[in-house]
Image: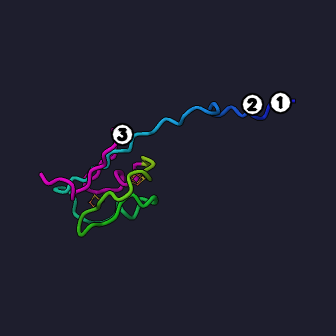
Amino acid sequence: MPNLETDRGGEPKGAPAAKKPLPVIEVKVAWCKGCGLCVEYCNRGVLQMDGVVPKVVAPEKCTRCMQCEVICPDFAIEVRDGEGQAKSPGEKRG
Ligand code: SF4
Ligand code: SF4
């Protein structure tokens, strides 16, 4: 009789889940024209318009599907693996 506890081929039981770093989602405000396409195409609710630029509101929900980056006509949004801090326009002005 197969042992259903161990024959599922998944992760070992009892091992602590490795914490995934949050992606870095960077909006290049100078290039963004505020069309909102990235917000519309993100079906995870990661992005929200904040006035005329998108803002990262839920980086933990990002699946790194890259739809926002692909759809942006101005190459103004970038998603990459990171150590944890997602940037949004309000955080830093440069
Ligand atoms: S990579 Fe995908 S899930 Fe993440 S912000 Fe862009 S569209 Fe949303
Ligand atoms: S799709 Fe690009 S240009 Fe349009 S709001 Fe998003 S970042 Fe800005």
Mark 1 in CB contact with mark 2 (< 8 angstroms): yes
In the image, residue 12 sits, relative to residue 63, either above or below, namely: above
Q: Which residue range is magenta in the image? A: 66-94
The amino acid type, in three-letter code, at marker 3 is Asp
Identify the disc placed on residue 2.
Answer: 1
Assign the magenta stretch its main secondary structure.
Answer: loop
| CA gap, disc 1 and disc 3 | 40 Å
> Is residue 45 shown left or right of residue 9?
left
> Badge 3 is on which residue?
81
Residue in view at x 39 percent, y 56 percent: 58
Identify the residue shown where x is 36% and y is 39%.
81
- Residue type marked 2: Asp
x and y, in percent, of residue 13 in the image = 64, 33
Ligand 1 under 8 Å from disc 3 Cβ: no
Report which residue position mark 2 lands on: 7
Q: Position of residue 21 (x, y in %)?
A: 39, 40
Q: Please provide percent x and percent y for residue 48.
A: 34, 64
Q: Earlier in the sequence, mark 1 or mark 2?
A: 1
Disc nearest the viewer among 3 and 2:
2
